[in-house]
Amino acid sequence: MFCINCGKKISESVTYCTECGKSISPETEVRTSQNPNLEL
């Protein structure tokens, strides 16, 4: 999946982006490799 804040590819098991520090919660809609063009 990809961080919704910076677009960096991140592991699905992390709770925050290691690039920008944005919190990634299960409720947060994220762009996945199956749908990288998801409009947010």
Image: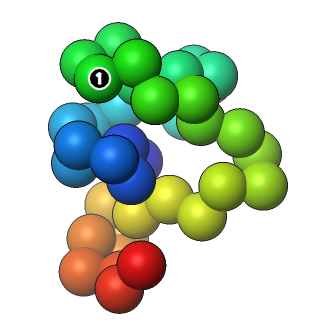
Q: What residue type is labelled 1?
A: Cys
Quadrant containing the C terminus is bottom left
- The x and y percentages for residue 33 are 32, 61
Residue farthest to the right, as pictured:
27
Q: Is residue 22 above or below residue 2?
A: above
| Residue found 33% across the figure and 47% down from its top | 5
| Residue found 25% across the figure and 19% down from its top | 19
Inspect this view and state whether residue 11 appears: no
Circle 1 residue: 20
Q: Is mark 1 on a helix, strand or loop?
A: loop
Q: In this view, does 20 lie above or below 40?
A: above
- The x and y percentages for residue 20 are 29, 23
Q: Is residue 23 left or right of residue 17?
A: right
| Residue found 66% across the figure and 55% down from its top | 28
Residue farthest to the top, as pictured:
18
Residue sitting nearer the eye, 23 or 13: 23
Inspect this view and state whether residue 21 appears: yes
Pointer 1: residues within 10 angstroms few (<14), some, or many (20+)? few
In terms of image quadrants, where is residue 39? bottom left
Q: In this view, does 29 lie above or below 18?
A: below
